[in-house]
Amino acid sequence: MTSKIDPPKIMFGNKELTVKQVESCVGGNLLGRTVNRIILGITKQVWINDQKVANKLKILDGDTLDKIYKATTNKIIKNLIFEQRTKVKMANLQGRKIAIIEKLDPSLRLFNHPAEYVKIVEHITRLADLPRGIVLAKHQDKLVWVRKDQEGWKVIPPLMEPQSVKEDELEFVDVDTVELEFLQKDFVLDLKGKKYPSPQNGRNNESLLKATKELKEKIAESGQGLQFKFSIGQGKSIATLDDALEASESGFVANKDERFVQALTHDKMNGMAILQAKGYLPEGEYCADWVALDNIGDMTIAIVADAAGNKKSSHDGSLELTNRFRQILTTQLVKLQKNGNLSSEDIGEALTQAIIRAELVTRSEGQMVGSTMACTIIIPSGEKRYAIGFGLGDARVMLKKEDGTAKDLTPTNFESPYSDPGPTFGAGIKKIVPIFQELRNGDTILLGSDGFGDNMEAKSLGKTPIQVLKELDLAGKLDNHPKLKAFAKNPEEWILQATSPSDWTFNTRRDDSEEAAKAREWQGSLSKESKALLQELHTLYSEHLLEEMDGADIADTIYTHCTKSPFIEASLFVLKMEESAKAKAADIDQRLKSLYQQEKDRILDELCIENLKKYKDFAIQLTDLDGKSEELTQLFKSWDEDPKLAHEWFSKDVRLSDKFKDRPGYEEAGQLKLQIDGMVNEKISPFSATLKAQQELEKAQVLDKLYRENLETYKDFAIQTTGLDKESEELTHLFASWDVIPEEAHLWLGYRAGKPDDFSLIAVTVK
């Protein structure tokens, strides 16, 4: 239902006119509007023409203009309002541009052409309009974090309810460029020569400082002596995915069946971004991945972020972190460039400043959501191009070369469990993996969340360590790895024992299973050298898998592999079975719980009947009322109908009230209650043990039936994921054991299924 708009009145001089009256004097045929103007002149002593209306609209506030625009059908008035609103927006835009130019300090390091500077300022201005989460401000001479919602600005104190504050009481602080000083567990910000501690921080900065220092040093060392070109010359432009993401967000972010796909290209690069929620996204949850792909002249910035969980706050946190990070990074790059040139030290400094400042904001959120990230800057140096950036947590960056070979630029530890994303924004940054890679024409840099990276690993594809060793050897991938090559010819006993995918990491879905226990024992026996060989195998297999994929449409090939492969379908099937098993188990629990309560009530009822006279005598003593009083008569009547109410009265009304404590019979009544409670527990105990055994038996029977009814589906997935013939000796033996114990099929497939997580991928191919 559309709410009715109440048209505002418009003042001309001291006369109040309706929108209809103004409309009658503007537009239409000459005779009609002339007559209407004469009538208004006689009745209201006001003469109106188009210019007077235009002048009046200039001094009205935005809300009033919006109301008039909605209320009027007159095209001339609508056009006048549109022009006025556009002028206001342009004035605001110019004001923001001036503020950005001031913070960039252009007098020190100008681009080669003023037009380039205008483009970058407009880009940063647009970034400032995107959702960025909480904002730093000074309030009552203290720094506070604030956020704006529908009700206005609110201070966000940790672990407390937000507090409303007026905007004119806030002096906003630019986190992108403000001078920062590190203390052990705090940041100090320098505002116009005065130092302010950052609000409510308290996390140790030592690991963050160490990680960013190492990142900066490694990037500087890798690019020593190189100069990179940051140019937005004539004919160049700035392009982003922002409009496409905004238009598509409501469609894919909470719908597992929809995906976001968008290309972004220029004469030196083809870019593609894909986003999709996980395949088992429950109703009311959201995709927690987000991406940004910005072409700024000849430079490209690609970012993938993945926040923890799938709540609305996860989605918002990932989106806001991405926007915040890219604005800080872009601003820092502009500040550090000198006549359009950047050194590797400059790029390393810009990246570390973006990490530090984004971390400062993220860790200070009232409801902090940790997030992983991968970022690369693809930038020219002479005739060559380089990818420079980092990987944080389980975000992944890989390279598919033009010749078909591949390189894992941010390899994960083979032991790392999927339940642990590693270092994240907000929850503590201890390690950052640097990226510095020369790119040739035809090379494709790939950035993705764990929905991409995890599904490029052997353990997600049902491969055991010994299988990976043999497969890589047969494919000729060990020729440049002499230790592994020799090991493949004469494998030692320890790797021959690795017969399960869970041997890579025992911390998988079922830590308490027999298979996980064996993996735990096996890993505990490994030497340092054995673990190094496993790590090499783990990384080589990810690269081998990427090499086997068709490079012509690599982004779509990876998307299909990570979201629609038999391994992913198998995982979705396993999850479906687990949900079904959980629901059936809950039904059993509820039914047996009801039986337990019925028996407990029956026992209590018998004991209360036996002791009803004692209850009534104690009630008379405690209340000091006559047993035939109206109050006790009504109370005793309810007890006669349901004797358990007598016990309940003593348990709640008497024991929880101070007024009875000093009354005669209070202690004795308490002893009676405890005595009856003890007798109930004693009498119910054998029945409870019987129910427990029945519960376990029924659950086992239900699970056996569930798995047996779906046994053919388990077998089909086994055939698809192993690539073996149904009649092969291995599967024949396996299926025979499943026919006897169907649960083994579920456990087996659970360890060999893929990981249907939120999926995000950016693929950038150099032309």
Image (cartoon, rainbow, N blue to C red):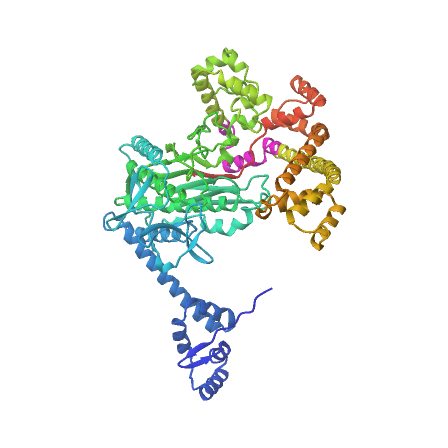
Q: Residue furthest bottom?
A: 42
For the residue pair 332 and 685, the one nearer the viewer reads as 685
Q: Is residue 553 magenta?
A: yes
Residue 668 position, x and y percent, is 64, 39
Q: Is residue 204 something one can see in this rendering? A: yes
Residue 322 position, x and y percent, is 42, 44
**Quarter location, residue 281:** top right
Q: Is residue 708 something one can see in this rendering? A: no
Horizontally, is 742 left or right of 157 in the view?
right
Residue at x 42%, y 84% (from the top left corner): 47
Residue 196 position, x and y percent, is 29, 47
Q: Is residue 144 magenta?
A: no
Bounds of the magenta span?
545-571
Q: Quadrant of the C terminus?
A: top left
For the residue pair 716 and 132, the one nearer the viewer reads as 132
On screen, 547 above or below 306?
A: above
Residue at x 50%, y 79% (from the top left corner): 28
Q: Main secondary structure of the magenta part?
A: helix
Q: Quadrant of the N terminus?
A: bottom right
Residue 364 position, x and y percent, is 40, 44
For the residue pair 214 and 619, the one nearer the viewer reads as 619
Count of numbered labels shown in the rendering? 0
Horizontally, is 589 left or right of 35 in the view?
right
